Each structure stands twice: as C-alpha cells, then as structure tokens.
Amino acid sequence: MVDSNCIFCKIANGEIPSKTVYEDERFRAILDISPANRGHVIILAKNHAANIFEMSDEDASQVYVVAKKVATAMQKVLKFDGVNIMQNNGEIAGQTVFHHHMHVIPRYKNDKVTFEYEHLSEGDILGDEEVAQIRALAQG
Ligand code: AMP
Ligand code: ZN
C-alpha cells in the first residue's frame, strides 16, 4: 500500500525522481540527499510501512538481501573499507522520515562518521523473567 502523504512512497514508486542505484518490484535504493559519508544510500520499500513493526514479513526478509546486493556493488565501485547497514525506528532512535528505510553507509579509513554510545554496566542487563517473556513472544 502507498501513503499519498509520504514522500518516500512517492520516491520509491518513481513519482518523484531520485538517483537510483537499484530497483526491483519491491524496493528502490537511492542516494541519500544529506549523506553521512560518500556513497550513503537508503533502501526504500515500495509498500508503505512506517517502521519495522509495520513492515510485511516479505519486505522485512528481502530488504537485507537488497542491502547485500547494493553494498557489494558499491564496494566494487567506491572501494570503501567498511560499511554500516542500519535502520532507525522511532524518533528516539533517530528516525526522521516515517517510512521504513535501510541505510547503507560506506566507511573509509580515517573518516569522521561516529555511532558512539557508552556501554551499560553489567547491572543493567535484563532479568531472567524479561528474557523468558521476550523469548515466549518472539518464538510464538
Ligand atoms: P532517518 O533519520 O533514519 O529517518 O533517515 C532519514 C534519511 O533520509 C536521512 O539520512 C535524510 O538525509 C534522508 N532523506 C530525507 N529526505 C530525502 C530525500 N528527499 N531524498 C533522499 N534522501 C532523503
Ligand atoms: Zn511511505
């Protein structure tokens, strides 16, 4: 389904032009308009889903395959030294456009990109009860 108010739906479905590095029946991968690094690409599903929780299992299972294809091609062309593949869900997690997208961010030796956070102490890990609850729900 497409959301007529969503700019990424319009880009993914070709209504708004973009610099496309990959397209198939489900996805379009484009250059990020405000890149974190040289060659920053975002992969957009053609079906609207605000985040991973709304995404269909089919799109969720395919998006990483697309990320692999795109990253492999980009590696050959850009000769990057590493790559971050990530996506944000919710404002607190850094999401600014509420149509699911996967970032493919090339990394080059001595670049200035950071995703740093402080690690919590061991006392902050989950308790057995929470682990059990999550496992029961995740495994269904
Ligand atoms: P996020 O913060 O994970 O929601 O990422 C949103 C990304 O979309 C940012 O990296 C933006 O630079 C990028 N972006 C926003 N609008 C456009 C656009 N019209 N075309 C391409 N990239 C965009
Ligand atoms: Zn959308």
Image (cartoon, helix red, strand yellow):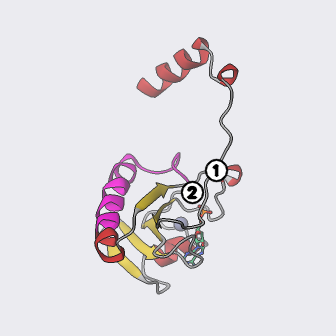
| Residue 52 pos. (x, y %) | 51, 49
| Mark 1 lies on residue | 116
138, above or below 132, in the image: below
- Horizontal side of residue 94 vs 54, given as left or right: right
Distance in Å between CA atoms under marks 1 and 2: 25 Å
Q: What amino acid is at disc 2? A: Ala
Query: Does residue 115 appear in this view?
Result: yes
Per the rendered image, the range of residues in magenta is 50-72
- Furthest-front residue in view? 110
Q: Quadrant of the C terminus?
A: top left
Point out the quarter of the image occupied by ligand 1. Answer: bottom right
- Residue type for callout 1: Glu
Residue 113 at what x, y percent from top left? 59, 63
Whole-percent x, y for residue 7 in the image = 57, 75
Residue at 61 percent across and 61 percent down: it is 98
Residue lying furthest top in this view? 128
Residue occupying image coordinates x 61% and y 58% = 114
Badge 2 is on which residue? 50
Q: Position of residue 120 (x, y in %)?
A: 68, 31
